[in-house]
Amino acid sequence: MARRLKKLLVANRGEIALRIIRSARVFGLKNCRRLFGGGRTSAHVGAADEAILIGPAEAAKSYLDIAAIVAAAKQSGADAIHPGYGFLSERPEFAQAAADAQIVFVGPRPEVMAALADKVAARRIATAVGVPVVPGIETRKFPQRVSSPHS
């Protein structure tokens, strides 16, 4: 039986965070918006049920800090994390860190992300299960780089 989620941490900002927050409310989820330095008056922060300070405005020290985001989710009592798009949404390490902390990652499982990150492998998977694909590169045979006198 699937467990009922109660609280969602939104690990994104701006318009996408607003959309996720609105959707979460439709499903009766409380939500918290991960907040980092400088964004305290943003619309998505005001729309969330609560906001959590993660770190400074510099993305590498806050927005992209997987351990800090997972810790914030645990601290807030969130049982799920929605990555939004971009940044961490395509990082299997983020999905795995959430799973390791018993927090639902709203997105593909880490092993699916890893498999589909390689376009050639993804084409092979799609072909193997009968998904039509546009003809294109089937292997990793790339031309040798030609040295130029200027390189």
Image (cartoon, helix red, strand yellow):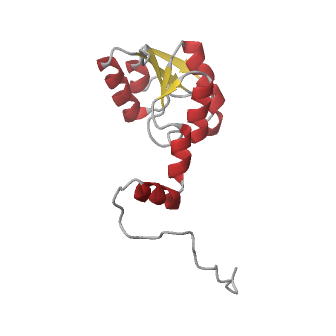
Residue 50 position (above or below residue 147) = above
Q: Quadrant of residue 85?
A: top left
What residue sits 57% from the left and 75% below the top? 142
Q: Indicate the quadrant containing the N terminus: top left, top right, bottom left or bottom right.
A: top left
Estimate the x, y position of residue 126 in percent, counting from the top left: 42, 55
Estimate the x, y position of residue 20 in percent, counting from the top left: 37, 28
Pick the front one: 11 or 98: 98
What residue sits 70% from the left and 79% below the top? 151
Residue 69 shown left or right of residue 7 in the figure: right
Residue 130 shown left or right of residue 64 in the figure: left
Estimate the x, y position of residue 95 in percent, counting from the top left: 55, 34
Residue lying furthest left: 26
Residue 68 position (above or below residue 125) = above
Q: Quadrant of residue 16?
A: top left
Residue 104 shown left or right of residue 71 in the figure: left
Estimate the x, y position of residue 17 in percent, counting from the top left: 41, 30
Pick the front one: 49 or 29: 29
Pick the front one: 65 or 111: 111
